[in-house]
Amino acid sequence: MTTSVIIDCDPGHDDALALLLAVGDPRVDLLGVTTVAGNQTLDKTTRNAQRILALAGAEKIPVAAGADRPLVGDLTVAEDIHGASGLDGPELDLPVADVAGVHAIELMRRLITDAAEPVTLIATGPLTNVALLLRTHPRLTRQIRHIVFMGGSTERGNTTPYGEFNIVTDPEAADIVLRSGLPLTMIGLNVTHQALATTEIIAEFQGMGTRLGSVCAELMTFFAGAYRRNFGFGHPPVHDPVAVAAVIDPEIVRRETVNVTVELAGAYTRGATVADLHRRTKREPNADVAVSLDVDAFWRLLMAAVRTVSTANTAG
Ligand code: RIB
Ligand code: CA
């Protein structure tokens, strides 16, 4: 059984692995990829999405660029984490596939409208495009099965003490999504920080003996240096593929159905996700919040998918 999926992303080292997981796992029918400004500027996140799809031999999957800034305020990219290109580390060939000649919101509308079944949206960047889609085409919600987003945290943040990058970048967009009434799953730092690309994982990428395997090893080596320098992590957490894995195998995360809000006005906490895990407020539950991850199952899933893509494109 396959799931029809659109991925909205801001590649980004971990977004790249999320795309490879979606391309390589047979349970995902990746209808299209849309890009948003976040880790880097929109032109760079879009070019990076094209590069990864081209490397994976998936140039036929349509790519469309979306919002180049958050709904409110200015964009602050994560150059300290993902580098000037947004995918620093490997030398990547320039993309071969053109971007779709439409805005991301229009591509999403077309794909969702034409899909044979309701579509699952997986967001691994700021939620700007998803919020714009819900506001521009409110009647489409009937054909959206589920929104799974990598963002937020039930604990501390990574961009501010209590704010995670994707949500802090566009809190208003997150608020629109959290109030949408659609089935939501939040994959926060509290679980993604368990998905660490260890030296053994990097060696396994390299051991694939393919261009794609080497690119993944080089991406993770750069990512490891960035996380060591910025956070003192021994290994880098690959946040975004956890959201894709949770769609492929829902059992890979344990969830609590609770109320999640986002702080919009806090002087020190703007962009913090407030997950009422102990149900202390009377606010209605509106999201499934991941609270634990089957780490071994996650890596088995991801490495199998990358190996599939890798061997299918021996040149890739
Ligand atoms: O906070 C981690 C998230 O922000 C990941 O999606 C990473 O790619 C960045 O977008
Ligand atoms: Ca991302």
Image: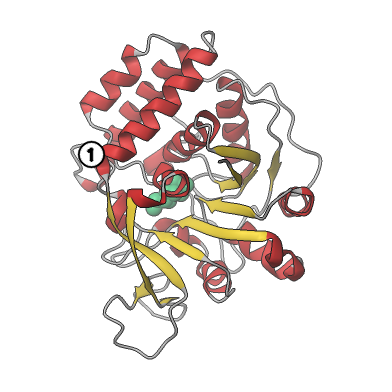
The structure's colour scheme is: secondary structure
- Tell me what residue is drawn at x 73 percent, y 70 percent: 138
Q: Which amino acid type is marked by label 1?
A: Arg
Residue 25 in view? yes
Tell me the residue that label 1 is attached to. Answer: 228
Q: In the image, residue 188 lies at what x, y percent?
A: 36, 58
Q: Nearer the viewer, residue 190 or 230?
A: 190
Query: Residue at (80%, 45%) from the top-left corner?
Result: 102
In screen coordinates, is 25 left or right of 213? right
Q: Specify whether tag 1 is near ligand 1 (CB below 8 Å).
A: no
Q: In the rendered image, which quarter is residue 287 located in?
A: bottom left
* Quadrant in which the N terminus is drawn: top right
Q: Is residue 83 visible?
A: no
Element assignment for label 1: helix
Horizontal side of 143 relative to 150 (left or right) equals right
Q: Is residue 230 above or below residue 281?
A: above
- In this view, 126 is above or below 23: below
Question: Observer-nearest residue: 30 or 196?
Answer: 30
- Residue positioned 60% across, 59% down in the render: 145
Q: Position of residue 299 (x, y in %)?
A: 31, 34
**Residue 144's x, y, as percent?**
65, 60
Residue 159 on image: x %, y %: 35, 58
59 lies above or below 183: above
